[in-house]
Image (cartoon, rainbow, N blue to C red):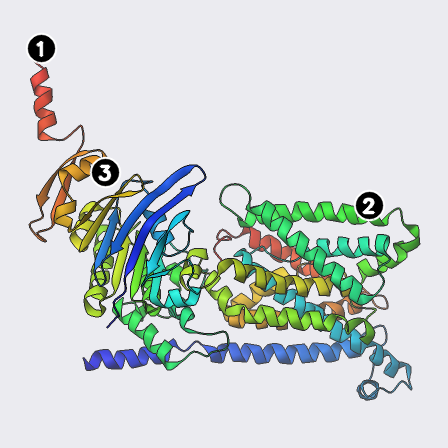
Amino acid sequence: MTATITRRDSNVASLRRPNRVRLSWLLALVVLLALLMVASLAIGSRTVSIGDMLLGLGGSLDTLGQAAVNKRVPRTLLAAIVGAALGLAGAVMQAVTRNPLADPSILGVNMGASLAVVTGIAWFGLSTATGYIWAAVAGAAVAAVFVYTVGSLGRGGATPLKLALAGAATSAALASFVTAVSLPRGDISATIVSWQIGGVGGASFDSIRPMLPFFVAGCAISLLAARSLNSLALGDDVAASLGERVAVVRVVAALGAVLLCGAATAIAGPIGFVGLVVPHLCRLLVGVDQRWLLPFSALAGAVLLVAADVIGRVVARPGEIDVGIITALIGAPVFIAIVRRQRVRAL
Amino acid sequence: MTHNHTLVVDTLSLAYGDRTVIDALDLAVPSGRISAIVGPNACGKSTLLRTMSRLLAPRTGHVLLDGASVHRMPAKELARTMGLLPQSPTAPEGITVADLVGRGRQPHQGIFSRWTRADDVAVADALDATQTAELADRAVDELSGGQRQRVWIAMALAQQTDVLLLDEPTTFLDVSHQIEVLDLLTDLNRSKGTTIVMVLHDLNLAARYADHLVALAGGRVYAEGEPAAVLTEDVVRVVFGIESRVITDPTSEKPLMLPMGRHHTRDAGAATRHEEPT
């Protein structure tokens, strides 16, 4: 009897999750993000001294260096916010679809957002950032529903492969629609091209501000859904028997993801692979508990995109390579690695 | 100790498209006992269980838990009283046993509530009851089939429901693990009074472990009651369409069904010999 009791007590203690490990990873990521953000302020076509950086951060514009820092502050913030949004959106989409290949760009969600924005610019005179965001969110939602529906048709429901194929086909179709809409409109093509290439280079506080409510709402919805997504990970039947309303959880969590990647795409243009790569890396670090995985994915997404932005400025000095190209270079090999793995369906 | 609950299926019908799977079925589940549902493939036994746990919505009729329709009850409230372990559930890759079992606490937690001492104790109890405590830190996907099924049952136990439904809990297990799982469920029933309803493929195991045996045929209850009254040669003939002999199992004194095919029976051999002289 005593044996049982002591064993149980040690069990209870050992059941505490290895939170210390996770907390140290969290700390490491925060420090890394801080360092990268400092680098992002310092590095560019003009390298800035620490003194100038501090003055520039204080709002001083006396030297060129200080002015450059001043320009780089919103850009750095935007990279962090967009990266966090895409990383979190990717993690939520993987959880909602129980599909390791789910990602805003692979599922065609980013292209849906793009088409909506481009169509808005071309046909409806869309010109405000808030207008871009609403259009992008609507386009992202329609694309998400469409791809998921197509991917669920036939035997076996929404398997990873079918979803990826449906997403790729939809992305390709939407991309050609984007071209079809923008090509005959020479008058607006400059606007469209600059938005599409977008990236984070042209950021200003005025362009970031309209995105913030969407970002905050998307984060809140996604993180509040984490516990329910944990149940969903055990399959629809088990989730339902644990008292989850499975369809509601799916719709709400997907809404969070759509808000996040819609807003990110509206401001920074389509950026691929962040949402795919980041959750997989984070799963290696913190495991499958969504309550840790989701915030980690947001943080790591911010790290990745700020890093990609810095790299893009370093490798092509004095020019710049768009973050979307850098993330694709990093993301494509990871995508292939995931596809090649045998147990790709077991999420 | 658990509370008594009445679980009643009232003229339930369910169809997939045009095909009626359950046809005006009535069933009263005895509280605090083990019930086993048996029947041939496609007789609607899994469908019945899934409808009882509201994974499926009936076309007509009700499933009443303590007099209230389970399909209208708040989902979490139902999940605190009645749990379901579906057939061959899948766990996410890399999840640990402790994490999986801990997720059984979901219906007891709100969006903002923290993991409590009560949750810890419930999980530890569930691990102890299923003898999976030593596996707590292992990844579920590296366990054997029998261990994995015990872990899933531990998750259902952590949910601490008074009623537990299981859809073929012994599928894909070898005979020793089948017995292990059914013994475990019997322990649970005897020690806590948990009402257990399970769909089983194996008639003899069902007859041995169930207090109440339910034989389904064509979407209706053909026979129900004590195993000795239900598992008869006549019932096997009608429900499964085969001849059989039913004897009394010398170890459990429950009925034991011996199926007869066209081969390997003493009568069939005699018949063949009879025909040879012509």
User: How far, Cα to Cα, is label 3 from label 1?
Assistant: 36 Å
Q: Which residue is tagged 1?
A: B278
Please report the residue visible at 21 percent of the width from the left and 80 percent of the height from the top: A3
Q: State the image coordinates of residue B100 (x, y, percent, origin top left).
A: 40, 66
Q: Secondary structure at mark 1?
A: loop
Task: Specify the quadrant of the image occupied by residue B72.
Answer: bottom left
Foreground label between 3 and 1: 3
Asked if residue B85 lies left or right of residue B250, the reply is right
Please report the residue visible at 27 percent of the width from the left and 78 percent of the height from the top: A7
Please report the residue visible at 20 percent of the width from the left and 82 percent of the height from the top: A2
At label 1, counting other C-alpha atoms closer than 10 Å, the crowd grade (few under 14, some 14-19, many 20 or more) is few
Q: Are marks 3 and 1 in contact (CB under 8 Å)?
A: no
Q: State the image coordinates of residue A314 (x, y, percent, origin top left).
A: 78, 69
Please report the residue visible at 60 percent of the width from the left and 60 percent of the height from the top: A254
Given the image, on which type of amino acid does mark 3 rest? Val
Q: Which residue is tagged 3?
A: B239
Furthest-right residue in view? A187
Residues tagged by mark 1 and mark 2 found on one chain of the structure: no
Q: Chain of mark 1?
A: B
Given the image, on which type of amino acid does mark 1 rest? Thr
For residue A180, the mark is 2
Given the image, on which type of amino acid does mark 2 rest? Ala
Q: Secondary structure at mark 2?
A: helix
Q: State the image coordinates of residue A8 (x, y, percent, origin top left).
A: 28, 78
- Residue B50, compared with residue A202, is above or below; it is above
- Residue A304, compared with residue A142, is above or below; it is below
Q: State the image coordinates of residue A176 (x, y, percent, origin top left).
A: 77, 46
User: How far, Cα to Cα, is label 3 from label 2?
Assistant: 64 Å
